[in-house]
Amino acid sequence: MIDDEKFIRGEVPMTKQETRILTLAKARIKSDSVVVDVGAGTGSISVEAALLAPNGKIFAVERKAEAVELIKRNVEKFSVGNVEIICAEAPDGLENLPELDAAIIGGSGGKLEKILDILCEKLKISGRIVLNAITIQTAAAGLAYFRAHDIKYDAFQVQITRLKKIRAHDMNQVLNPVWIITGEK
């Protein structure tokens, strides 16, 4: 896994390394997987997924121009040629995707249900959707969707605390808690 500081960031939010590890593990990406990363931000998940699936294809969907530029720069920096960037506000940009092995949602712009409708159609049998939710409303909406559509799911919240050196001491540096909700078709 790539250290956070190795990614080009700018002012765009990025999924932190510990959360990326758990997210990618839940996605069960294989060497030939086809994956979409919705709300790709800096592209940290897209890049890591591309490294896990060198014979596969990763689609990074992002609406913000600054973030799209960062994804391009990170894709180039880490030499992953199997990432296709789609500059669109999901659910736009999802309808032309091929059949998917996994879908990762890091941002939904308030359109989670419409995004999930399309992704569930595109997902192969036994394919997985991994939703990272930083708000309780997004987590609740994801759980409600999976229940309403009889999709097998699991969920957990992760709270990462790192140590930060302050002179001769170490202080807790708390990162935002994240709900990781995984649904399987």
Image (tube, grey):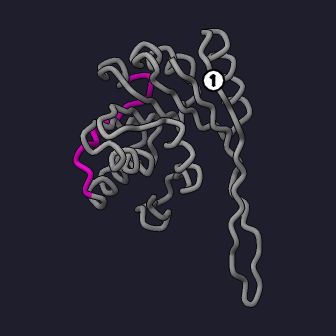
Amino acid type at image mark 1: Tyr
* Residue 81 part of the magenta segment: yes
- Check the image and report above or below for 88 versus 120: below
* Residue 66 part of the magenta segment: no
Magenta span main SS: loop
Horizontal side, residue 139 vs residue 169: left or right = left
The x, y position of residue 137, in whole percent, is: 72, 29
The x, y position of residue 57, in whole percent, is: 28, 36
Q: Residue at x 39, y 32 (%)?
A: 36
Q: Residue at x 46, y 36 (%)?
A: 28
Question: Residue 88's quadrant in the figure?
Answer: top left
Question: Residue 112's quadrant in the figure?
Answer: top right
Horizontal side, residue 118 vs residue 33: left or right = right
Q: Residue at x 50, y 17 (%)?
A: 185
**Residue that carries the numbered disc 1 in the rendered image:** 153
Horizontal side, residue 99 vs residue 176: left or right = left
The secondary structure type at the circle numbered 1 is strand
- Check the image and report above or below for 40 versus 111: below
Report the magenta residues as a range.
79-92
